[in-house]
Structure formats: C-alpha cells, structure tokens
Image (cartoon, helix red, strand yellow):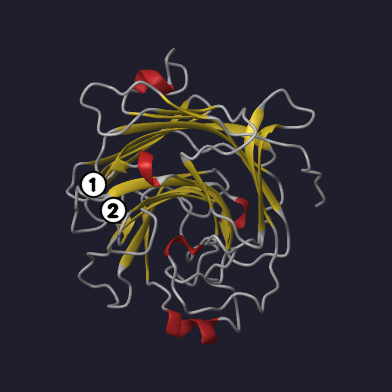
Amino acid sequence: MKMQLSYALAVMLIAGAPNANAASPTVRDEFDATSVSDNWFSCGRDENRFSFGKIPDEARSAATQIVRALPQNNVLAFAWHPKGCAREDGTYDRDGSERSELWEAEKVLAPMGTDIWYRFDMFVDASITPTTGRFVIGQWKQTNSPQDAPILAQRFNGRAFTVSIEQDNADPNRDPKNVLCRVFIASQETAPVEPGFGNAHTLVKPAQLLSLMKNQMLSVGHDAEDLAHGAAPLSLPGLTGCAQGLSVTRYNSLPDPFGKWTTMVYHLRLVSDKTGLIEIWADGKKISKTEGVIGFKPFLAKEREYFKFGSYRNHAEFETVTRLDHFIRSERKADVDPDGTLAPP
C-alpha cells in the first residue's frame, strides 16, 4: 500500500473544565491542529509514521497511524526501556512486535478504578486478513501492572473484531504456567469465540524468544498463540474456561469495522475486587456489559490507567492504516453522549 502523507496533519487536545471532585480532567480531541498536543505521547519506531489533521478527500480530520513491516531479523534486544518507544536519540528497545500507537500522556492519566467514559471514532483499513495473528488496536493498561498485559483490549485477530479483558487465572486446576485468563466480552458475528469464553495462557519470557522466533514473531509479555486462542465452540452458555468472578451479558454483536469508521463508547471501572464494570456500545448499539473481577491483584488505587490507540501486532508483511477522531474522555456520560444516542440504556 502506498500513501502520500506529506500533508501536515494535526491534533488538538483540549482539556475541558474539570468536574467537581473529578479524579481526572475531561479530555477532548478533534484532531484539527498541525502538531500533536503534549497530552498525547507518540510511540515512534522505525516501522511507523504519524500524521495529524485533515484527511485528503474527506471532510474530517483525524490522527493517522501507519505501521509497516520490519525485516524479521530486526526484532531482538534485551535491554529494557519503558514503553518500547523511541528515546530522544531515536533508539528504542526492539521487542519482537510492530506498533504505531498514540498513548494518553502521563499528565492526564486517571487513577485506577475511576468511573470513566470514553468515546472515539476509529478507522481500521481492510489490510488485516483471515490468517492474521495477534493484532491489537486500542487497549487500556495499568501503570506498574502486576502483569505485563492489557486489562482491556480491542483485538482484530483473523479479521474478526473482539474485545477481551485479562484477569489473574484463579482456576485451581490450571497449568501453573498459565498465570493469566483472557475473557472475551464482545465479538463480531464472524469471530471464533463468543462473550464469556475464558482462555488460559502464559506470558512469553525473554529467554523463550530465541526458540519461539523460529516459528513466529512474538512480543515480550504476551502469549505465544494468539490467532484464534484455541478452538472454541460458536455458542457458549455462561462463563466457560478459566473465567471466574464475572458476569458477561451480551446484547449485540460488534460491527464489521474494516474499511470504515466505527463509533465506540466505553464506560469503565477497572478494579479487581468484584466491583469492576465495562459497558460497550458501537455505532449507537449496546454490545455488552461485564461486571466483577477485572484486572490484576493487588489492586493499588495509587496506580493509574491509560489508553493507547493504533496498531500493535506480531510481524506481518503488509501495511496497516488506522485513524482516531472525535475523542472524548470524561467522568460524566453527558460529555461523551450529550443527546443519548451513542450509549442508550
């Protein structure tokens, strides 16, 4: 795919008036300016490009992220650096993954457990194939997390849109190495898993990379098998697998997001003490509601949660373009859905 991105694009992030007793500022972004705001962190790497502002031949502006294929021999390094993004001198710690992400900047992060709403429009191009492995576009993580995994993630493996959460694997019969349980809480109709399915998995350690690299590109801190995450029945009654301490209610399937704009709304309370909450809407339809143990123990309110958007994948031989627009984050639903059409009850 060849794209001309010599035009100047822009991001404007406006901190709205803080709510009374709010734990975090309200953040709005229409991506209209000519440079990225310091409320965003752009994770620069050799394989990515960022641009901001008006999209050619469209009426809207957006943050545009492009991820390209890296040579497969350019992925291993064992010097650690936070976030895996470029330092001021342009160097970064290669981790076996390819990414092109915007991160919420440190100064606007909300404390863990904040009752908070997110609304954004996302564009995912049609490059992802039915055989594509791990491909995350949009995730929420915890600072200094007990586990190197996202609490909540939008996954596009195998060209199927799903949303998953991670929790500690408390199954007494688990394989000791499977310390995490991934639970799917929303899915596109074509996905091989349905909400309520929990799949046990381990983390890939640095020492495992050399042997695993013979077969596939991996990212430190992520599981090795991430295309369909094992075989799963198409219809699952209630919670199955390692999922515990959760209630997952499905209302609708996720829409097909490829090659088009999709409006997402999330209502989050990310806590691991059985009072966690995730509600999801897409294009004005309620998709699912998840309650219970969400995230990892111990829960430390002093830590903060952060959102990042853009491609994060194993090595792939194709280029992918993602875009982010109409971003609003607030502790008030009225700020993200003022007329009640994007997140109906």
**Pointer 2 or 1: first along the chain:** 1
Kindly indicate the quadrant of the structure image that contains residue 297. bottom left
Q: Residue at x 33, y 72 (%)?
A: 178
In the picture, measured across the screen, residue 52 lies left or right of residue 225, that is right
Q: Amino acid at mark 1?
A: Val
As rendered, which of 328 and 175 lies closer to the eye? 328
Disc 2 vs disc 1: Cβ atoms closer than 8 Å? yes
In the picture, measured across the screen, residue 219 lies left or right of residue 54, that is left
- At label 1, counting other C-alpha atoms closer than 10 Å, the crowd grade (few under 14, some 14-19, many 20 or more) is many
Vertical comparison of 274 with 255: above or below: below
In the picture of the structure, the residue carrying the numbered disc 2 is 295
Label 2 to label 1, Cα distance in Å?
6 Å
Residue projecting furthest to the top:
339
In the picture of the structure, the residue carrying the numbered disc 1 is 271
Q: Position of residue 16 (x, y in %)?
A: 40, 23
Label drawn at residue 72: none
Q: Residue at x 31, y 28 (%)?
A: 331
Say which element carries label 1: loop
- At label 2, counting other C-alpha atoms closer than 10 Å, the crowd grade (few under 14, some 14-19, many 20 or more) is many
In the picture, measured across the screen, residue 305 lies left or right of residue 52, that is left
Q: Is residue 109 visible?
A: yes
Q: Count the numbered circles shown.
A: 2
Q: Residue at x 23, y 46 (%)?
A: 271
Q: Residue at x 72, y 22 (%)?
A: 59
Q: Is residue 344 visible?
A: no
Q: Position of residue 139 (x, y in %)?
A: 45, 49
In the picture, measured across the screen, residue 301 lies left or right of residue 144, that is left
As rendered, which of 203 and 323 lies closer to the eye? 323
Q: Amino acid at mark 2?
A: Gly
Say which element carries label 2: loop
As rendered, which of 99 and 244 lies closer to the eye? 99
Kindly indicate the quadrant of the structure image that contains residue 221. bottom left
